[in-house]
Image (cartoon, rainbow, N blue to C red):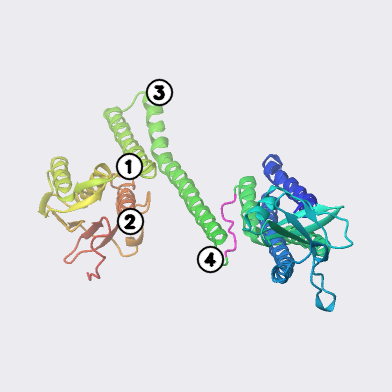
Amino acid sequence: MNVARLRLAPFREAVVRFTNTLSSARGWPMSFRARLALVAAAAVALAVVVASFVIYFVVRGQLVGTVDGSLATTAAQLSNTPLHDFDHFAAPQSELGAAPGYPQLVGANGRAFLPPGETVSLPINDRVIQVARTGRGRFFMNTRVQDTHLRMLTFPYGPGLAVQIVRPLTEVDHSLGRIENLLILIAGSGIAIAAGLGLLVSRAALAPVRRLTAATENVTETGDLSQRIDVSGRDELSRLAGSFNTMLGALEESSRAQRQLVADASHELRTPLTSLRTNIEVLASERELPPGDRERLLADVVDQLGEMTALISGLIDLARGEGEPVEPQDVRLDLIAAEAVERTRRNRPAVNFTTDLRESTVRGVPGTIERAVANLLDNAAKWSSAGGSVEVVVQDGTVTVRDHGPGIDDKDLPYVFDRFYRAPSARGMPGSGLGLAIVRQVAEAHGGNVIAEPADGGGTRMTLRLNGYGEPEERTS
């Protein structure tokens, strides 16, 4: 109805302005908390607006339906009343002061016949004349007469006649006006409350994000990777905080390992570099050297260069192992072990190798696996005396290398796979202290492990497991 449109116009304009504000909010320098509160308020506003319109039209339908029912009752009474004289036609009387309506007769020619004493004519259109002519059909419509909003029912009445009966909608419009004002007040209050609650809820919900932001900024400023965020709950933000803590732990461990590697490498390089520099300075001096000393110094320089080359190669291998991962592929572990045994035999002809290589396929990077197996074989051969034997067994994703050397002291077993660790008995032997560390790195990168243990009858047994094959077994020496 026109009155309803006029009364709802300010409310609709306010909603449109709010929607436009929300649409342009992307360009504002707003915090995430403000945007979250704004979205919550917009969602509530939309729900309130939709609910308000639904309530308004439902109430309007009920009120207008009551008027329509009253008009239909009056029409039924008029339809059963004989018409003897147009001048005496009038609406029937209603009980208890109810409004029966204002009737008007319309002829097929469009002429109106008013009740006795009435002078106000109701509007007549082609549809009303059509009902009078055909004697069929009835309809309701809204109209306005002398600035009064009316509800009108038109229905056929006898040959060539139709009846129009109206009732004012003043009370209905007044009631709808109060309902509109009430709905606007409720909608505005609901939106304001939603915005306030949205700020409070967003503040509580984003507390883990604020802690995460503060921790990130503090780590950026101080470089301290030991900080952690308190995690409680199982929601998405708690999972984010947990992931952040895990990331910090991984970065801290990586940084620690990097510092340790640099420190160990510096320490290990210092001794051969100092000795190499001393020998070179002696060789470069102009003083006369006793017979044979010059050749001995040159041999020492070559040996020291070899040690440094081995050490640098080991460091490069460790760095590659910690670099970008290589796409794994199916690898025949028995074939790799066979090739590694052949190379070691050529390099260590004084050591006898016996093998039991059963077909075994693992998933991994062939080059790194081959280096790990070669390091195990080289370590076993280094500790074997001339004519000694090394036994190599491959099965079910494991490589077992057993030597018959002096074995490893119990106090040294926990450290043999650490970088640059060399047992007291091994410090006079060639080596960089990185070979077994590379083996452990390769094992862990392939989802496995490596263990060293005393072997029955003397010597050491080392077992490399890949892809989780072969759980460690309890062994006794």
Which quadrant of the figure contains the C terminus?
A: bottom left
Q: Secondary structure at mark 2?
A: loop
Tell me whether circle 1 and circle 2 mark residues in contact (CB < 8 Å). Answer: no
- Near mark 3 (Cα within 10 A), the count class, few <14, some 14-19 or many ≥20, is few
Query: What separation in Å lies between label 1 and label 3 (alpha carbons)?
Result: 50 Å
Q: Which residue is mark 1?
A: 326
Asked whether the residues under the numbered discs 4 and 1 touch, taking CB atoms below 8 Å apart as contact, a structural biologist would say no
The answer for how far apart the CA atoms under marks 3 and 4 are is 73 Å
Horizontal arrangement in the rendering, residue 201 relative to residue 477 (left or right):
right
Residue 320's image quarter?
A: top left
Q: Is residue 9 magenta?
A: no
Image coordinates for residue 167, horizontal then vertical, percent = 79, 63
Residue numbers of the magenta segment: 224-231
On residue 285, which mark appears? 3
* Residue bearing the label numbered 2: 416
Q: Which residue is mark 4?
A: 234
What kind of residue is marked 3? Ser
Marks 1/2: CA–CA distance: 27 Å
Q: CA distance from mark 4 to mark 1?
A: 34 Å
Which numbered mark, 4 or 1, is in the foreground of this view?
4
- Residue 248, compared with residue 317, is above or below; it is below
